[in-house]
Image: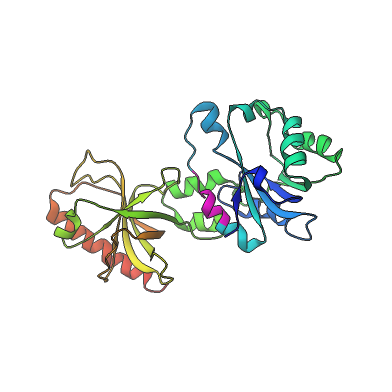
Amino acid sequence: MIPLCSPHQARTPTALALGSFDGLHAGHRTVINEVTKNPPGIPTVVSFWPHPREILYAEPRLRLDLPFEKAELLAPIGVEQLVLVPFDRSLAALKAEDFIETILIQTLKARLIAVGANFRFGHQRKGNTETLKKYASKAGIEILILPILKDTEGRMSSSRIRTALSEGDLKLAKKLMGRPYKFQGQVVQGRGLGRTMGWPTANLQVDGRKFLPGLGVYAAWAWINSNPEPQKAVMNLGPQPTVDPTAPSAVEVHILDQEIDLTKSKVIIEPFQRLRVQERFKDLNALSSQIGQDAEQARSLLRDY
């Protein structure tokens, strides 16, 4: 995996793509590709962490790709390092031209900078592509401004991916991202109720900064630890209205037709298709019967993939 580093740890000089790049959709890759072909420096992606709105407005910003996931995705397309600029109030107060001078020129020694046409930065987001061209060009840095990529439904954006996932539309999310959506979690101890019902589940502890799909029951693929072979699974994402309506949302995964000890395992999940929304059943027998139907539907959907 390519290194994750702060600006002061980065290898220099750099050819850098600057932006959030959350979801790494086709529009993002268009920008990033500009710094991987015949670059005049180390091909680098530069993003901010945490998201500026988390610091400025205490507004949680869940990510489609956590930093380590983004690093795994960037390596195959020729990026050699992912630089995370620590965002705090002192950085937020930095004028756009000072950010260019101190971070991009002095620290990262940029030779080439690629951004999307809607890129904004600096104090109160007053900096834009014209600001970047004006100040960086003086230092002999090549600036590339890439147009916003559009399809028949509008511009490519991370918000469209989030909307698709929130609606449980995994096919659309995959189309927009150019790859299947995945997340991972660590198996933690549950109450064991699923096992008593004949449907043992693994309870996953997922990083709270990860954006998850809409609540419901899904057919899914599961990768367990380092095993490259995926397992067919049914996943419940959300609360437990029949078992305990007051319980918080959880991620529960049942591996189909396998007896696997998942204690303390790391599990990567690819939700494949939402089977149904959550509902409250009259008793545990009715719930168990419905899970059986969910399992059969999941087997059928995953059989040919």
> Which quadrant would the C terminus be assigned to in this image?
bottom left
Write down the quadrant of residue 233 in the picture: bottom left
Q: On the rendered structure, is 55 left or right of 297? A: right
Residue placed farthest to the bottom in the image?
Answer: 304
Q: What stretch is highlighted in magenta?
A: 63-71
**Is residue 89 visible to the viewer in this orientation of the structure?**
yes
Within the magenta stretch, is there residue 295? Answer: no
Coloration mode: rainbow
Total numbered circles: 0
Q: On the rendered structure, is 107 left or right of 49? A: right
Viewer-closest of 76 and 180: 76
Viewer-closest of 227 and 282: 227
At horizontal 76% and vertical 38% (from top left) the residue drawn is 129
Viewer-closest of 194 and 265: 265
- Vertical arrangement, residue 266 with respect to residue 280, above or below: below
Q: Position of residue 81 (x, y in %)?
A: 64, 54
Q: On the rendered structure, is 291 left or right of 217? A: left
Within the magenta stretch, is there residue 65? Answer: yes
Q: Where is residue 1 in the image (x, y as percent from the top left)?
A: 57, 60
At horizontal 55% and vertical 50% (from top left) the residue drawn is 23
Q: Where is residue 111 in the image (x, y as percent from the top left)?
A: 80, 48
Viewer-closest of 136 and 299: 136
**Is residue 146 visible to the viewer in this orientation of the structure?**
no
At horizontal 54% and vertical 38% (from top left) the residue drawn is 50
At horizontal 80% and vertical 55% (from top left) the residue drawn is 40
Residue placed farthest to the front in the image?
Answer: 9
Q: Where is residue 264 in the image (x, y as percent from the top left)?
A: 31, 58
